[in-house]
Image (spheres, grey):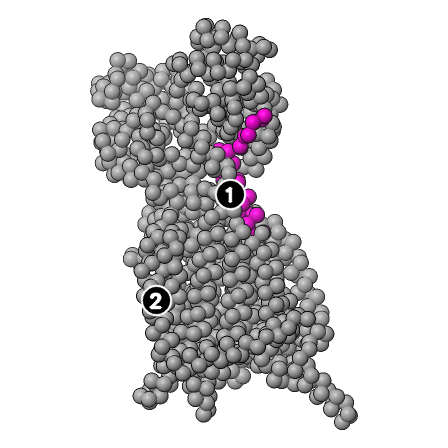
Amino acid sequence: MIPQIDVQRYIDALDAWIVDRPGRVVLLFLLVSGVFVLGLGASGTDSGTDQFTEDVPAEQALREVNDNFERTTFDDDSGTTQLIQSGTNVLSKPELLRMLRAQKRLADNPDLQVAGTTSVARAVARTLDPSADSLDDEIRAVERATPGRIDRAVRTTVAENPRLEAVLSEDYNARSASASATIGTVTHRLPGGGSEGPGTSGSSPLTSIQLQADYIVSSVGGDITVFGSGITSEELGNVINDSLGLVIPAAVALILLFLIVAYRDPFDLLLGLVALGMTMLWTFGFMGLAGIAFSQLLIAIPPLLLAVGIDFGIHAINRYREEHVGDVSVREAMRISTDQLLVAFFIVTGTTVLGFAANLSSGLSSIRELGIVAAVGIVFTALVFGIFLPATKVLTDRWRERLDLPEFGSAALGSEESLLGRVLPVGVYVARTAPRAFLVVVLVSTAIMGQYGAGVDSRFTQDDFLPPEEPPAYLDYVPEPFRPGDYSVTRTTNFLERNFQTGEEDTTTVYVEGPLHHDYALEAMWRAGDDPPGSFVADDGHARETSIVTVIRDYAERDPEFAALVARNDRNDNGVPDDNLRTIYATLLDSPARDRALNYITDDYSSARIQYAVEADASQEAVTDDTRAVADRMRFEATATGGVIVLKAVSDVIGASAFRSLVIALVAAAAFLVAIYGLLEGRPSLGLVNILPIVLTVAALASTMRFLDIPFNVLTGTSLSIAIGLGIDYSAHLLHRFVEEYDEATDVDAALLATVRGTGGALTGSMLTTVSGLGVLWLAISPILGQFGLLIALSVLYSYLASILVLPTALVLWDRYVATGPGRALRSVGDADLEYQT
């Protein structure tokens, strides 16, 4: 039995401050707001997707690979820009000249740090003039050639170098020497490091270089598109900003509309908006003071604070209006209201914070930051709406009474005479007639939906953040100030997939660390590729690989002296040295093959990388599993890595985080509710009753995600724990109000009717405002924002329906089989009197 505690003295102390010294309370909150103003904008923003990959071991290994092996003939890191040219025939004389002139203008600009350029146009020009050794010479060679001679040069060039077909569109026709698209490449030196993994970062120096390159190339004419990770990164930020610029005005308009309907009083509306603004100020000020950068994932914070803040605000005002009737004074009405609301807000805040804080268990720091900021923001919301708003309301109403200002809509939502008051008790009517049958239906439905929803996929790709290729039709009706810009990245990537050969194979990487000078090292690394798994490309029973072993073999074929050294130290005559590896390495690194060798082994022989060819159509999961299996064969510490594996690893972490945070949130919330209802009411069983609508909500949301093919990604992966946080908000408000009515009534039916009409009316206003205001995120250009907005709106809607429809039945059955306390005792006396009279 959990002992009860007397919290009334603490509530009375807060009541005294709120109703007797409201001016001091308001002043204190304004002073604290001034402190948080100092933190606004102090932490900056992070719009890159690399924030989601940095905590994954495969990504850390990939960064080490890039740091150790991605060497060029330059000391600085490098980055590349693609020039995608399309037209009727990009191999015609005018189009070849356009590509050459575009590459020359880029190379001549010192700000672009151009290290080199390649293109079919350059190769054709050197066929026309083998002595050409600069872009100027190549341009002159093409200018002087006749169209017929150019056609012959194109056929000769591609025939002699078949690799060029990879940068020509699939419709390349050798007979007519024509193609509709081609890709040129520009390599840049990036001082200070510019290498990027599968994620992109908005702070990359490549971004500014490629934006400038885009401006320069546009002056050449023709259809040449500048494309690269820097352009993609810039567009990611633009998509997010344009999405917010589109949906925020619409969300504000809808929220204002429903708040006007809910409050029906300009003074109360203003108070609610000020409280919402203060909540945002405190939260973002905290982020600045704590050094937490605003990222794509933290876009979830404003909707969450709006959802909870709107709910708290409507509850506070609506509860006060229920009490402020007849001759009841402002002071007395507010004291009664805060007596009840402070406990309800504490329960809601505790469970909501636990729901959001469950994200601290995630393996991704960005999701952990979301958990921290959301939890802190909810605490701020409770303080502002639980203390500041009531104190300000007391000041305002006293001022209105002194000035004899008129009252506007002051009746509580859901009053018995209203249409809403007649509709809301539908769950009570069901609970009257067949509570056990209805509960069985609910439990079976929850189990079925939970089983179906367990199959939700988890994915992490850059496409989650990019807009669709064709803009939605509704954008045609958006006024110019809010209309998003034009986006090219998705269109460009789709164009590349449609027009260029993707090849029959891709690559994956194993990063090996250890004493690679030991005699067995090379043989052990080579044998790991024997009998390769299914997704690997095989050559005579061995994986097709590129490694320090292949570099040794290739150089041995060109240098007889080195070949003899290898043969003397190769025990089984398979071309892989088994002895004197230090001598082998030193000789290789002192040869013309040094640069290539350093792409696969470090100069201290402590780490190496092996690249394996994999089938292009192999799934992300298959490549990941097979690469890890090969890495496990190594006799050294080995890590499977590469772009595909990093993205799969992030997907796995997201899926695991979603499940883990869901379990933690449910268990923690249930434990908290059992404890708090035991301590405050002496009825711990009510905590379990409170959880039932939440479990139903989570099951319904997960099944909806699977039905709509919405995967767990970095933003939607938090939706289940958020659903718990928001869902408990609705059921906890109803349950706490029920307990108050239950202890005063002799009929559970009457207690439920008072609850769903009083608190249910406020819940309805909150639900409509939140669903409409946040559901508008579905219109966002960014797919990930649209999915998140839809899920948040659905979680609020499902929570509301589960609380209004299911909770009454659970409470009726609780009253029959579990209940103890004053309300139960009163009804027992009433039943006994009735039997005696009969």
Judge whether residue 524 is colored magenta. Answer: no
Q: Residue 638 magenta-drawn?
A: yes
Q: Look at the image and tell me in which quarter the C terminus lies.
A: bottom right
Between 33 and 815, the residue placed more toward the observer is 33
Quadrant, the N terminus:
bottom right
Q: Residue at x 48, y 52 (%)?
A: 368
Residue 435: percent from the left, percent from the top? 69, 73
Front one among 678 and 250: 678
Q: Which residue type carries mark 2?
A: Ser
Which residue lies most toward the bottom here? 837
Circle nearer the N terminus (2, 1): 2
**Numbered range of the magenta stretch:** 634-659
In this figure, which residue is indicated by the disc labeled 2? 33
Crowding around mark 1 (Cα neighbors within 10 Å: few <14, some 14 to 19, many 20+) is many
Q: Main secondary structure of the magenta part?
A: helix
Tell whether 589 sits left or right of 545: left
Which of pointers 2 and 1 indicates the residue nearer the eye? 2
In the image, 351 versus 803, the foreground residue is 351
Foreground residue, 176 or 352?
A: 352
| Residue 476 image offset from top left, x and y in percent | 35, 55
Residue 89: name its quadrant: top left
Residue drawn at (43%, 40%), measured in percent from left and top? Answer: 199
Q: Amino acid at mark 1?
A: Val
User: Residue drawn at (53%, 65%), measured in percent from left and top?
Assistant: 350
Q: Residue at 63% across / 56% down in the picture?
A: 450
Check disc 1 and report the residue beneath it: 650
